[in-house]
Amino acid sequence: MKKSDSMAGWNLEHSYAELPQIFYTRQNAVPVQSPEWIIFNTTLADRLGLNAELLQNSEGAAIFAGNELPDDAQPLAQAYAGHQFGNFNMLGDGRALLLGEQITPQGDRVDIQLKGSGRTPYSRGGDGRAAVGPMLREYIISEAMHGLGIPTTRSLAVVTTGENIYRETARPGAILTRVASSHIRVATFQYAAHWGSIDDLRALADYTILRHFPQVQEKEQPYLNLLSEVIKLQAELVAKWQRVGFIHGVMNTDNMAISGETIDYGPCAFMDTYNPATVFSSIDRQGRYAYGNQPYIAGWNLARFAETLLPLLHEDEEVAVQIAQDAIAQFSEQYHQHWITGMRAKLGLFTEEVEDEILIKELLELMENYAADYTNTFVALTLNKLGTSNLNDKPDFQAWHSRWEDRLDRQTQSRDEVMQQMKRNNPAVVPRNAKVEEVLERAEQDGDYSLIQPLLDILQDPYAYTPEQETYGAMPVACDPSYRTFCGT
């Protein structure tokens, strides 16, 4: 290791590369013309043990562009295969490279990945590059999700490449540095099950257990416990998405991380007007990944994961299938419990009553019927400022509000305690689509990055209820039914 590397704080290991060779291809990044900084996440860098001050120069930009790498980096592209919109395909890192696993000062192991780093054997004819807009979208949304307390990959840096990439038109190129607990996906297991041997599959499962679920290593049925742990994490994750109105946009099996983190921010967005059928992705023409379908799709993806583990669950295939089905059957109940617990908290309910679910669903139906803003409706209830909601003058909402007030009276907590609980569970702000698009358009078309940090500052602690957040949240946010997002290809 060079002295400059150690001073910069790099502490890379490569446990993933100890897996069988079929799981990856070693490759260097394709150099770019003239990398320059757009943004660097100094707070995350500090947590990773990196010297932010030392890295924020031209040499650092070269590292995060892949032109130069720390001596102990061993870049590789990961192989995986999965279902895209229900169709099984061979996939893999077509434009990304894993540099290694940074061991943080706290002893955590996290992947450091460059996204947009050039072609790999898995590129399937693509150029392996990425544009400024999609990379900044991932940076902004992933950091906003972190602020919301939702498990997610993080964004460490975005640099420009000095080169254009060509999609419909020429667009400035960029490379994102992504930090993840790991990049092991449901699709990684699908690849092992389809193209690997049972020894390869077992090696991947054992590695995943060691890395993410060491508590199940000594269990009598470690692979069943692996499946159960992943189900638990995904049930909680998707419930958290639903509670804040987040729409992933492309819940293919390659976009479901075994670690339980939200991964791959392509055509993602947050819902403005409440409607379970909301779809923003330009490629999701049938609404497969609509907001209201996300829990179902998560269960479907987990069933595909369970299928890959069948040879490890029991030597008798019929018995293995029954074991897997029994495990998957737990997802719906676990998801529902996380969802209703979170929705009770959003309404300031500390206790449980049988009629709570009806109360919650009636509110959602009112929001849908009157095209109410999802985030701001809960903010208005939290602050008791219903005059800001377009529901306030509706007789059926007023009747619902009276029932809610009666429900609050049946618990012992004071109204101040109720408000504080609601503040902890109802974000004052989410990344509004119009504001995100404004930032991306300014960056991509004009090379003006001045709007990025102010938006990130607003989103850093969305439960703070600051005056700045009140101003941001009160801005006109009428839902544009024609609004579309695009995969960052």
Image (spheres, helix red, strand yellow):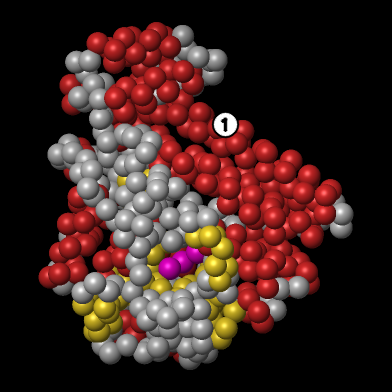
Instruction: Write down the residue under mark 1.
Output: 337
Say what secondary structure mark 1 lies in: helix
Q: Quadrant of residue 13?
A: bottom right
The local crowd at label 1, few if under 14, some if 14 to 19, many if 20 or more residues have their Cα within 10 Å, is some
Q: Quadrant of residue 438?
A: bottom left
SS majority, magenta? strand
Q: In this view, does 222 lie to the left or right of 345?
A: right
Residue 187 seen in the current view: yes
* Quarter placement of the C terminus: bottom left
Taking the view exactly as shown, the residue that stands out farthest to the left is 446
Q: Is residue 164 above or below residue 464?
A: below
Q: In this view, does 157 lie to the left or right of 123?
A: left
User: Residue 131's x, y, as percent?
Assistant: 29, 72
Q: Give the range drawn in magenta.
A: 178-182
Residue 8 part of the magenta-drawn span: no
Q: What residue lies at 46% left-to-right and 18% top-to-bottom? A: 358
Amino acid type at image mark 1 = Gln
Q: Is residue 403 above or below residue 69?
A: above
Taking the view exactly as shown, the residue that stands out farthest to the right is 316
Q: In this view, does 449 lie above or below 248?
A: below
Of residues 95 and 456, the one nearer the viewer is 95
User: Residue 237's x, y, as percent?
Assistant: 51, 45
Count of numbered tags: 1
Q: What residue lies at 79% left-to-right and 60% top-to-bottom? A: 311
User: Residue 337's x, y, as percent?
Assistant: 57, 31
Q: Is residue 433 above or below residue 367?
A: below
Residue 64 seen in the current view: no
Of residues 380 and 88, the one nearer the viewer is 88
User: Residue 336's x, y, as percent?
Assistant: 55, 32
Q: Is residue 132 left or right of residue 251?
A: left
Q: What residue lies at 42% left-to-right and 81% top-to-bottom? A: 125
Q: What residue lies at 23% left-to-right and 50% top-to-bottom? A: 483
